[in-house]
Image: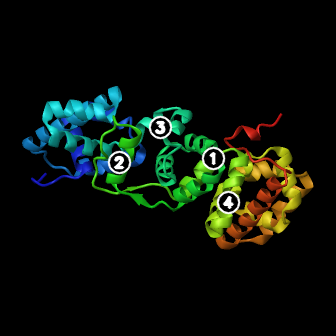
Amino acid sequence: MPQKKLSGKQKAAALLISLGPDVAAQVYKHLSEEEMEQLTLEISSVQKVDSTQKEEIVEQFHQIALAQDYISQGGISYAKEVLEKAVGTDEASNILSRLTSSLQVKPFDFARKAEPAQVLNFIQNEHPQTIALVLSYLDASQAGQILSELPQEVQADIARRIATMDSTSPEVIYEVEQILENKLSATLTNNYTETGGIEAVVEVLNGVDRSSEKTILDALEARDPELAEEIKKRMFVFEDIVTLDNRGIQRVIREVNGEDLQLSLKVASDEVQEVVFENMSERMVENFREEMEIMGPVRLRDVEEAQTRVVGTIRQLEEIGEIVIARGGGDDIIV
């Protein structure tokens, strides 16, 4: 291996070579198939590990392992403090920077470990953009609970800000972290951190109660109809029909256009087909299967459009109280 700056994969390969086959085999047990394949390719391309590089790589690994241990003990700020005393400010920053990029240590770690009510106390009086930033980094269920507890007049605004959020600079993230938790250190990366987006707000809204979801979506629809419609499309996808109870599925079957349902089932998973067919009569199942066979090959776009229409019907049935879509909130509990 020539004397040059190595990539993360090359360093990992060199480290496993240095540690020997027995240790490497133990490490492999904790990797995914894709990771094993990539690492094996890197190892196979290494002819020789220079002794100097070997020492540097092993030392880097040792430092990162220590830093991770410090973070587990007392958080990033504690790790930074200990490392600064041991190796100096610059090297401590370098170690934590490598750690946060390699182990994906996210900002607002303290908030993810806290109860939603505690986080709510931290952020409820902050600017909506600050609240949106924090919620976008939390677990979806946690963020959904917090959003449900915020005043209704700001819920839609925050949801919109999460959906339209693109990237946030490390400096801004650091400033917000300092406001909410002084013990956290700066985000030690030069890259912009991408978060938010429509998928993020969909996950958050899937965690709120039905009343809050309706309030937020209604307000969003008035302010940004296109964004609201895009969010609605992703709130419940066709495959989620398996989450409905038998009564709900039977109601959907009666309501939707038969050809749309046949098209939708054409490329649906076995689980979805089984659930739908279980809620049909034997004769209806036979007719459906025959029609689907006669249909032959179909365009994916036609299937997706049919599924969209079926999902639209499902959401309409939910709106009028005919069926219940399970969500994170307690108001969907059936008694």
- Give the residue at x 70% y 53%: 215
Instruction: Find residue 163 and report its image quarter.
Output: bottom right
The kind of residue tagged 4 is: Ala
Distance from disc 2 to disc 1, alpha carbons, whole Å, reads 25 Å
Residue where numbered disc 1 is placed: 151
**Inter-mark Cα distance, 4 to 1:** 13 Å
Locate residue 157 relative to residue 245 in the image: left or right: left
Q: Position of residue 274 (x, y in %)?
A: 76, 49
Residue 298 position, x and y percent, is 70, 72
Closer to the observer: label 4 or label 3? 4
Task: Identify which residue is drawn at 83% across, 45% down.
Answer: 246
Label 3 SS: helix
Q: Earlier in the sequence, mark 4 or mark 3?
A: 3
Position of residue 52 relative to residue 163, above or below, is: above
Q: Secondary structure at mark 4?
A: helix
Residue at mark 1 to residue at mark 3: CA–CA distance: 21 Å
Residue ID for mark 2? 175
Residue ID for mark 4: 219
Residue kind at label 3, given as amino acid type: Arg
